[in-house]
Image: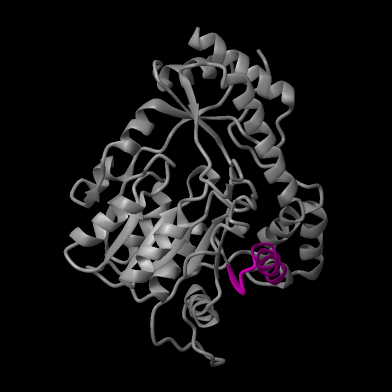
Amino acid sequence: MNDRIFLSPPHMSGKEQQYIAEVFESNYIAPLGTFVDRFEEAVCSYTGAKHALATNTATAALHLALRVLGVEEGDYILASTFTFIGSVNAILYQNAKPIFVDSDESWNLSPALLQEAIDNAPRKPKALIVTHLYGQMAKMDEIMEICRKEGICVIEDAAESLGAMLHGRQSGRFGDMGVYSFNGNKILSTSGGGMLISDNGEWIEKAKFLSTQAKEPYLHYEHKEFGYNYRLSNVLAAIGVAQMEVLSKRVSRRREIFALYQKRLGKESTVSFMPEIEGSTGNRWLTTLTFDEHDPMDVIEQLAHANIESRPLWKPMHLQPLFKHSMAVVDGTSERLYHQGLCLPSGSSMSDADVMRVCNTVSGILR
């Protein structure tokens, strides 16, 4: 049996253990410490954001963003339907109501359907959570124009897209707030963690307050409102600092892997790859493609027999039983992608030979 090829395994830089050792030497292994500060500073430096807050998950960061914006029970929140549920769980945490918006040819949220969703909402939505899917930028120029006109705040779910750019600007930097994920399978991994960014310092300070149990500034424990235990560990932040030092290399390698797949499998007439919108450079977190004539679940099963991990594309949120009563403005795009597509192994530690092994296996299945 050939060695297993995983979908997107962690890829360490080599300095993680050195930095973790420094954490243990300082004995600041509890939440907060110098590496948390360094991690936040590194993300600000890389993205150009003025302020950042390290959290224990990206979902926690999204939740804090909604709290900071004053989202309350019964408020409507617009959201991409073609995404992972972590993008929208925070809406339920606030007892708010999602309105799901379908994708367009970019696979990301459709500006035209966004406007339709706003026009048909029972009342004006309070915010939009727009996902940059699989590391590819959404049409943020058009989306921001609509939301600014309508007075709707924008939160970028850039969990999958750290390192992606549109017109030279980093993902997460177009909206009012942005969120990144450092989960085990992301392009930068701390095993688990997230980051909330914004140019609004008051919002980040409020989020920081809420993330540390909303403790008032007294020696004794005084609380006027409820908060959460959402801060990132200093130990995990040390991993993040080491990972940030090689992020550009990781993005470059993922793009190289995508190009290899495209060169080899692009010859198959029934295969189409996820596009990049004009002016954008994705991080190609995962190489994703669709089949015109083959069942992706059959391809996934046969890849598994070859010890190669692959995944279906996200099942749209409006098709999830949890959201069967939620409002959605859809035209079938994300449903078609879900039924026709899959994700191929894309880890930055893959060799060219690994990529060719996957390509040859897929080509054999198609024929």
Q: Residue at x 79, y 70 (%)?
A: 26
Q: Compared with residue 153, is residue 83 higher up or lower down, i.e. above or below?
A: above
Which is nearer the eye, 307 or 289?
289
Q: Position of residue 249 (x, y in %)?
A: 75, 46
Q: Residue at x 46, y 80 (%)?
A: 214
Residues drawn in magenta: 37-53
Q: Position of residue 215 (x, y in %)?
A: 49, 83
Q: Residue at x 65, y 36 (%)?
A: 347
Q: Is residue 20 left or right of residue 225?
A: right
Q: Compared with residue 305, is residue 326 higher up or lower down, i.e. above or below?
A: below
Magenta segment includes 340: no
Magenta segment includes 50: yes
Q: Position of residue 161 (x, y in %)?
A: 56, 50
Q: Quadrant of residue 231?
A: bottom right
Q: Quadrant of the N terminus?
A: top right
Q: Residue at x 62, y 20 (%)?
A: 264
Q: Is residue 65 left or right of residue 357?
A: left
Q: Position of residue 44 (x, y in %)?
A: 66, 68
Q: In the image as oriented, which residue stretches furthest toward the front?
A: 278
